Image (cartoon, rainbow, N blue to C red):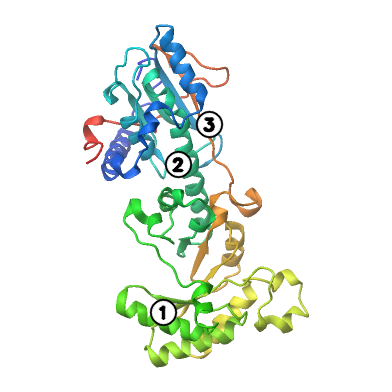
Amino acid sequence: MNTTRAVATATPGRAASHTSRAKALHDKLREFPSSLFQFDQRMKDGWYTDRYFVRTARTIAHDGRDPTVCMQVFAKRRGVVAGVYEAIRMLETQLATHPVTGRRYAFSEVTIETLMDGDEVEPFETTMFVTGPYLAFAHLETDYLGVLARRSLVASNVRRVIEAANGKPVIFMGARHDDWRVQTPDGYAARVGGAGSVSSDAGGAWWGASGVGTMPHAMIAAFGGDAVEATLAFARYCMASEPDVGVVSLVDYRNDVVTDALAIARAMRAQIGLRSLSAVRVDTSESMVDRTLLREAAQLPRELVTGVNPILIRRLRSALDAEGFSDVGIVVSGGFTPARIRRFEEAGVPVTGYGIGSSLLGHNDGDADGLINDFDFTADIVMVDGRRESKAGRELRPNGRLIRVDPEQLGGSDA
């Protein structure tokens, strides 16, 4: 990086912290080789980039120029950064060939200074500097900005959910709400944000986890609508084939949560054994009033008794406890957001875990839900051939938190 850049004041404590962060960054990068990301080789030719970046590179080359630039990457909102390791591996392996001479640019010609996945950032705080021959990476701007945007959106929303849940388990159930091709990176981003579990094996692929889950309504339907028989069959399957899987039964199929939860708990205790039922999950439709609350429905505002609500969960908890099932947890799902979770937590609703899906992908009402529905990143040239050069308002913004990537410590792109 050019020596004209401002440097943060060095102190012993900051130096030690920076050294430990640098070690952590390179340790993580060795866990994420480029082969993990399965980059499409057409990326090198600009097939995935906005066309004007390709034409810009060709114009510069046609004019006989090959400038060294510093690209500054930032976002305009507060959140959690994710996608950094993927962006670095992209820059390492997908650099271009000079449009005129045919020379392949080398990663050794590029310098990267960056934050880490999981770092919190402020609006306009520099997330990454990329310095090197502009023709080497001009075609990747669309791609690495897109990676950072999508991953950081998911990670930031999950972090907000985790904070609202006060340490209770959160299952990331976003797979069914978007294209299957983003399951793996979305699952990783959810992990960066703090989610302990994902719903599909693909979602856990980058961090070595398998998908978790209870049972869908389809399983109960396949057993003729008998949630007890479906749960017993599920338990027998788990014991035979996946003994580490805890049995969590879905109890809202007939819209009679308390009756069915008790019937399932009794049957599991009688036929499978004590503590064989880990939890029950309530996923009552937001337009429905459970049969347990029909009396309250005539006396209370409808919004207090529809869907998964505190009154229903307290009633279910009391019923389970009264029959000696205090060890059976209650997982809730269906339209949960940080704002709604926070209301449950502040009211002390006896929930043991939350399942959350589409709202974490940006399908939400923003601040009203306590979530965000976009996390766009921008990249600007801020230096050209060692001198400051930028669009007005996008001047160089040094950041003492950035860590310089050492190519010698990456362990090889496909280690």
> Quadrant of residue 252 in the image?
bottom right
- Residue at x 58% of width, y 78% of height: 253
Q: Nearer the viewer, residue 261 or 210?
A: 210
Q: CA distance from mark 3 to mark 1?
A: 50 Å
Labelled disc at residue 124: 3
**Label 1: which residue?**
234
**Can you say whether 252 is above or below 63 in the image?**
below
Q: Quadrant of the C terminus?
A: top left
Residue 211 as seen in the image, left or right of residue 177: left
> Quadrant of residue 273 in the image?
bottom left
Element type at marker 3? Answer: loop
Q: Residue furthest bottom?
A: 270
Q: CA distance from mark 1 to mark 2?
A: 39 Å
Q: Earlier in the sequence, mark 3 or mark 1?
A: 3
Q: Nearer the viewer, mark 3 or mark 1?
A: 1
Residue 201 as seen in the image, left or right of residue 20: right
Would you say the residues marked 3 and 2 are in contact, meaning their CB atoms lie under 8 Å apart? Answer: no
Spot occupied by residue 171 in the image (x, y as percentages of width and height): 46, 62
Element type at marker 2? Answer: loop
Element type at marker 1? Answer: helix
10 Å neighbourhood of mark 1: few (<14), some, or many (≥20)? some
Spot occupied by residue 299 in the image (x, y as percentages of width and height): 78, 79
Q: Earlier in the sequence, mark 3 or mark 2?
A: 2
- Residue at x 43% of width, y 27% of height: 46
**Can you say whether 44 is above or below 359 in the image?**
above
**Can you say whether 272 is above or below 14 in the image?**
below
**Label 2: which residue?**
81
Spot occupied by residue 351 in the image (x, y as percentages of width and height): 52, 71
Q: Quadrant of the N terminus?
A: top left
- Residue at x 60% of width, y 81% of height: 254
